[in-house]
Amino acid sequence: MPRWVHFSRLAAVLSLWRHANGHNAILNNMRLVDTLHRAVSLQGIDDALEAKAIDAVAVTASSYSTGVHWTFCHTRNERAPDAWDRPGRRAEFQPLTIEHLMASSAIPFLFPATPLWVDGRREYFGDGSMRQISPLSSAMHLGAHKIMVVGVGQPQRSGLAGEPADGVARQPSLGGIAGHAMASVFHDTLQADVEQAQRVTRTLRQLPREVAAVLPYRSIEVLAIHPSQSLDALAQACAHELPGSVRRALGGLGALKGGGAMASYLLFEPGFVQALIELGARDAYARKEELLAFFGAATA
């Protein structure tokens, strides 16, 4: 590889490191904040609640300040249930804002923490998947009897360094380890919670009705959908759309060799987004009958 390529990658990594050192994050997401403020009508939430098209909207975020996982719920005032308080996870009922969305999606290291007010004080929050030990609990607390889960877990994740052509495993790169660690944090608890909810429901349905009625559990129908193709592979195919500085930095970290796990968290580019939409449409159509039955619709 030419020496200037190594120098270019090193310069990109140093630039990102300086930004991270000054802003406690590698990337600046202020343009996304501006876009969301222009494109998202938060009044639509209140309109949908008043029309009873929806009963509640909730987003989750993890507090860097206290370590508590918070669920922020937006409901009609007259139907707001009591806020729950469990070890390590709590809820608060307040109107949702763009700041809640930014806090919920602030991927650690990549995007800066977002300040929010809880319990009368300001705390700093990051991605809601962190420390989320029970992802389905919020929907259950809000009264759901059916839960449709759209996950991003993959049937065969690309390995840390990709599948070697000669069958000999390679030492993983720093970027590969980071992508694998993020996938483990963000995906594993969701699948475990889905399996637990389905197991409890099966058990309750096998018990006599009078016994099930006195137990502190209720039956929840859960339908979980996951992509049929590797999102890492899609990300790797679209990695050329990333801005040059980001692409060079990822290349310097080894994050583009044989797998796109790290790149998939940074690809907000049209090609990748469209590929995700098309994959989702194909996967949904492949399970058309199951989806229609879950939502109680008659098939044609």
Image (cartoon, rainbow, N blue to C red):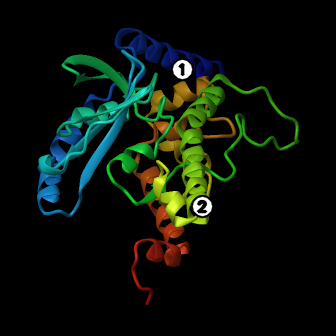
Can you identify the residue that label 1 sits on?
A: 8
Percent of width and height locating residue 195: 60, 51
- Does residue 31 sit above or below 228 in this rendering? above
Where disc 1 sits, the SS reads: helix
Q: CA distance from mark 1 to mark 2?
A: 57 Å
In the displayed orientation, state which residue is furthest to the front.
210
Amino acid identity at mark 1: Ser
Depth check: 125 or 232 in front?
Answer: 125
99 sits to left or right of 88:
left
Instruction: Tell me which numbered mark, 1 or 2, is placed earlier along the sequence.
Output: 1
Q: Is residue 222 visible?
A: no
Percent of width and height locating residue 166: 88, 42
The residue positioned 11% from the left and 58% from the top of the image is 50
Percent of width and height locating residue 243: 43, 35
292 sits to left or right of 283:
left
Where disc 2 sits, the SS reads: helix
Depth check: 216 or 201 in front?
Answer: 216
> Which image quarter: residue 92?
top left
